[in-house]
Image (tube, rainbow, N blue to C red):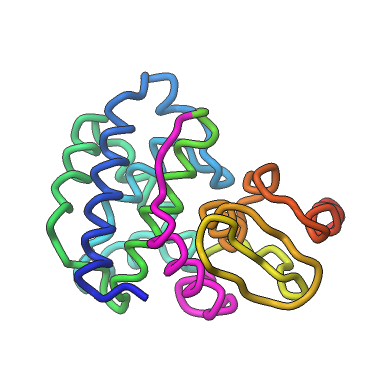
Amino acid sequence: MMNEDEIWAAIDSARGRTADLLEQLSDDEWAQPSLCDGWTVRDVAAHLTLQQLTVGDAVRIALRHPGPMNSMIRAAARDRAALPTDRLIADLRATIGSRRHNVGLTAFEPLTDILVHGQDVAIPLHRDLGMPADAASVVAARVWSQGGRGKARVFRSLPLRGYRLTATDVEWSVGEGPEIRGPISAILLLLTGRRAALPRLSGPGVDDLRARVATG
């Protein structure tokens, strides 16, 4: 388990790595689809700059984009995505060292966002973006424990109850049933609804899960 100082250090490190990656992208890559359905790489990058909203900010966004939480989050990101690329990167870098987070959330949420959304950008562009196993295992445990509640409800769930998930690069496992094993980074992506993680996973539960999500 990581303490709060360690969590914020992991957030800062991941923000720096993600900003470095964004600086390398071409204009065409910024316009490519991310792993988030209907979101471009630019939309995801813009979303990552919206992690320190005050109560007033949140109220203004809700008034401007009334509706379900996911719709509000998506609309706010698209509004922000109209900013120049350099500004989005600078705004993300400006969050490094800050411990502010959106109202009603904890340090776990910005850690989840930066780790997962960083991969939402990197994977479809065939870019490598490291994800430390210790931070990924903490977030994976948090997402699993929420069981679709709290912040986890913004993710599209996959039917993972009934499987045993086992990390191969860190001591971490949850659940009961046919085993699905692989790097903790891939397991975290699976827990947050990213089917793109499946090729990095193995075990007797993988083919069964593929069949279930193909017909779901």
Asked whether residue 67 appears in the rendered view, the answer is no
Q: Position of residue 116 (x, y in %)?
A: 45, 53
Q: Residue at x 27, y 67 (%)?
A: 7
Question: x%, y% of residue 29?
Answer: 44, 24
Q: Is residue 107 above or below residue 117?
A: below
Residue 145 colored in magenta in the image: yes
Residue 6 located left or right of residue 197: left
Residue 187, horizontal then vertical, whole percent: 59, 58
Q: Residue at x 72, y 74 (%)?
A: 161
Provide the residue span drawn in magenta: 127-153
Q: Depth check: 69 or 146 in front?
A: 146
Nearest the eye: 193 or 82: 193
For residue 65, side relative to residue 7 (left or right): right
Q: Position of residue 215 (x, y in %)?
A: 87, 55
Tell me what residue is drawn at x 46 percent, y 30 percent.
127
Quadrant position of residue 107: bottom left
Asked if one can make out residue 178 in the rendered structure from this viewpoint, the answer is yes
